[in-house]
Amino acid sequence: MFHQTPTRSIVLVFALVALALYAIYGGYFAREIVVEIAILAILAISIDVVAGFGGMVSLCHGAIMGVSAYTYGILTAKLGYPALPSAVAAIGAAAVFGTVVGWITARTTGIYFIMATLAFGQMAYTVIFKSRWLGGDDGMGGLPRFDFDWAGIAMNKSLPFALYALLLVLLCYVAAAWVMRSAFGRTLCGIHSNEPRMRAIGVSTIIHRARAMGFSGLLAGVAGIIAGQHIQYISPELLFWTVSGEALIVVILGGLGTLIGPMIGAIAFVLLKHELSGYTDHWHIVVGLVLIATVLAGGRGLYGQIEHWMTRRKARGAAQNA
Amino acid sequence: MDAGFWVLQFLNALQYSMLLFLLSIGLTVIFGLLHFVNLAHGALYMMGAYLGISAAALTGSYWGAFILAPLGVTAIGALLYFTLIDRLRGAGPMNQVLVTFGLIFVFLDIARLGWGDIALGLDAPAGLSGTSNLLGVSYPTYRLFIIGLGAVVMAVLWLVLARTQIGAMIRASVENGDMAAAMGINVGRLFFAVFCVGCALAGLAGVVAAPVFSATTGMGISILIPTLIVVVIGGLGSLQGAIAGSLIVGLIETVGAAFLPSFAAVASYLLLAAILVLRPQGLIPARGT
């Protein structure tokens, strides 16, 4: 079950402020990294919602993100609709896609769910990859950013865009935390830990699973909008299953089922990637080994491990006082 | 489109199906016995191709590679078994998927470190490098060799599983591992042996594929998804399922691609999704229910 503990709030604020300062005082490259972190963080949070709380390990979240990015691209670059309503529609499309996949796959669990989400994600990837109208493997360019010139904010500059991405991370985190704290989030955890019992007390597990995928898809859709606006170009690679796999790695590295962990994981992952690629061409092997070590160490992840130590210390302190 | 075109397409499909079969049979039996999802199976296939190229350079003969590469991959598999896989058997699908996904990354970079980023080729053995006439079309002899090899492996596995005591033990352990252990079968050793055979077949598929597709670092990831589709369509843990699944997927992806290119790419995913939703136990389930 999810609790927004004071520690989590402090870590959230601290991480976001640190990233904002990094964007403000770092140069152009720092801002690019911050945006990259923001996209990955939102995607990881959205996977954590289903995987960490609902036990649904999805390999189609890259595809959901891509559906949002492509819908945004079609509406703006192809059909010429204004950016803001198009973004809302695109996020909606991602949520609908997530709900539909969630509803169809709701009866499957474990490895079957993983495979089913893989199938639907790869289907979306293949359709876009093969579609000449959508640019196929050449991708699609010319996606606009939002126009906030009337407020004196030049979104085409790197700094305002990086801060806007961070703001969306905050919004997505708050939304996810709020939903996971609600009765719906509690029910989802219940379905994860004992599905027959939840069904016995009258909960429709299928509808809850589908809704969870829908909400998670909505968050992934937000990541898709930032990804589309960032380099103003999208390619089918966004939907490939390894994108979801990589985001899942981020969730595990950070701490599954904590919401804040995936964000920490995204920061660590992107920084590690850029640091390591400065020294060696082979950063994948490091990521792979770190991932294996994390899972073998109990799978709590960076943040989860720290929280685990803290609660153990508190428990030990309480035992000594008693 | 004359008859020759059809024969050609059918042979291509059959050849691809046999490669898929060699890979999926290992994956499916490992799942059936160990309940272990090994995403790194494609990486073992890639290692088979690279080890084969090195072995061929070392021994100066394709047949040296043909023998040594599966053995090398089996050694890698045994190492993985004792370090990771045995430990993760009860750890749930998510941990297994994650660790083996991490292994994909590790093997990807090992291949890049060891053999570089360039696609490497392997020459088909001298006797098989030409073309043969079959049903009025000339077809590369080496590809016919792949088809024949797949058929032989299929027949041997079928005989072993259906007619020998080892096969009966494996079938019993897939059906009910605890019961089999209670009847005195050393299930642990059986698991290890089956895992090694699965790895050897993946390595064999890799070295056999190298002359046709040439070895690249991406080959493991690109073959993984069709292999998983085969395994799930056929039914996890089922030999007959792996045969049926690899033929179906092989036909869809080659013959389908020749006629309906845009549909064929999605078709195998559609089939996978339909099977998972409507018949999750697969077309030919391993367990009689």
Image (cartoon, rainbow, N blue to C red):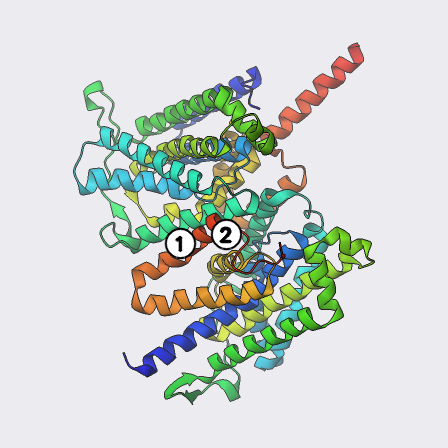
Q: Residues within 10 Å of mark 2 (few under 14, many from 20)?
A: some
Q: Nearer the viewer, residue A35 or B236?
A: B236
The residue at 19%/43% (across/down) is A78
* Residue position marked by numbered label 1 in the rendering: B270
Horizontal side of residue A152 vs B70, given as left or right: left
| Residue A247 visible in rendering | yes
Q: Chain of mark 1?
A: B
Q: Quadrant of the N terminus of chain A?
A: top right
Q: In the displayed image of the protein, which residue is found farthest to the top?
A: A322
Query: In the image shown, does A176 or B161 lie closer to the viewer?
Result: B161
Q: Closest to the observer: B138 or B268?
A: B268
What is the x, y in percent for residue A278?
A: 48, 45
Residue type at mark 2 is Arg
Residue A316 occupies quadrant: top right
Examine the rendering and report whether any part of residue B47 can be seen. no
Q: What residue type is disc 1 on?
A: Leu
Q: Earlier in the sequence, mark 1 or mark 2?
A: 1
Is residue A231 positioned above or below B80 on the image?
Answer: above
x, y percentage for residue A19?
Answer: 44, 26
Count of numbered circles on the image = 2
- Considering only vertical position in the picture, is B216 above or below A224? below
Badge 2 sits on which subunit?
B
**Foreground mark, 1 or 2?**
2
The crowding category of the residue bearing disc 1, from other C-alpha atoms within 10 Å (few below 14, some 14 to 19, many at least 20), is: some
Along the horizontal axis of the image, is A311 left or right of A62?
right
Q: Eyeballing the image, is A135 above or below A58?
A: below
Estimate the x, y position of residue A75 in percent, counting from the top left.
22, 38
Cα gap from disc 1 to disc 2, whole angstroms: 13 Å
